Image (cartoon, grey):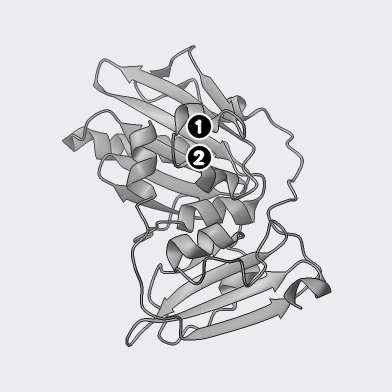
Amino acid sequence: MADSTETFLPTRRSVPALAALLLTSAFLHGCGTREPRNTAVIDLLPEQIGSWTRSDAVDTYDRETIFDYIDGAGEVYRSYAFDQVVVAFYTSAQGPDITVELFDMGKPADAYGVFSYAREREETGIGGGYEQKGRVLCFWQERYYVCVAAEERTDDSDRALLDFARAISERLPPASDPPDLVTILPDEGLVAFSQRFFHLHQSLNYHYYLARENILKLSDETDAVLARYAPGSTYLLLVRYGYDGDAA
């Protein structure tokens, strides 16, 4: 389902000058720390959802093999604490084939991060939030990022995507709050759904080209959130460093 990833991770667009930059320091780790996994990822996907049955053929890709599945966009997931993705296929005589991608992003903050990467809007009611674009619905919940894609879009496929997302959500750990760095952004003037949570210099340059060199010393050990404010196109960047010396 590599084409669905391209739908949610578009090419970088040019943006106006950065108008505000705030740096904070704390002894907190970035994407280098992964939380222990207690449940096999495939066990989180139901064998039956409505009239759809899961195929025995299930594909798994890790940090090294992700490019075999998603050529080009694999670095987006690797820029977070991505551990693996399980790809399952569902068939039904009563509807289109459906593919499910279940990404173990290592920790809740990074599941939110990849969800926010190209988000245009967000609905509530499934996981920590979900978005549907055409025949693809994605949501994040705890450490997991899930995408459900119908082979074709029909009147019934939209309902099926919601049914799939809800059925999978019920099997996942309870939803988490967005990263605390996101929650401290000022509300006044904040453009809805413009928040982007990430760690690396390459990610910052994707969302807003700052400089060729990594002048802010972003790394796996830093957390960053970029948001847009109105009126105009003012951007606010918050960076939390893992160690006191990082911001020097």
Residue ID for mark 1: 67
Which mark, by number, is residue 9?
A: none
Determine which quarter of the picture holds residue 113: bottom right
Which mark, by number, is residue 74?
A: 2
| Residue 167 in picture, x, y percent from top left | 46, 35
Q: Which quadrant of the figure contains the C terminus?
A: bottom right
- Which amino acid, mark 2? Gly
SS under mark 1: helix
Neighbour tally class for label 1: few under 14, some 14-19, many 20 plus, Cα within 10 Å: some
Q: Nearer the viewer, residue 247 or 163?
A: 247
| Residue 226 in picture, x, y percent from top left | 51, 71
Query: Residue 111, relative to residue 194: is it above or below?
Result: above
- Which amino acid, mark 1? Phe
Residue 162 appears in the rendering:
no
Query: Residue 96, relative to residue 234: is it above or below?
Result: above
Q: Which residue is drawn at 18% across and 34% down?
A: 154
Q: Which quadrant of the figure contains the N terminus?
A: top left
Q: Residue at x 51, y 21 (%)?
A: 59
| Residue 209 in picture, x, y percent from top left | 45, 68
SS under mark 2: helix
Q: Is residue 14 left or right of residue 224?
A: left
Determine which quarter of the picture holds residue 181: bottom right
Q: In this view, does 77 lie to the left or right of 117?
A: right
| Residue 27 in picture, x, y percent from top left | 81, 69
Separation of marks 1 and 2 at Cα, in angstroms:
5 Å
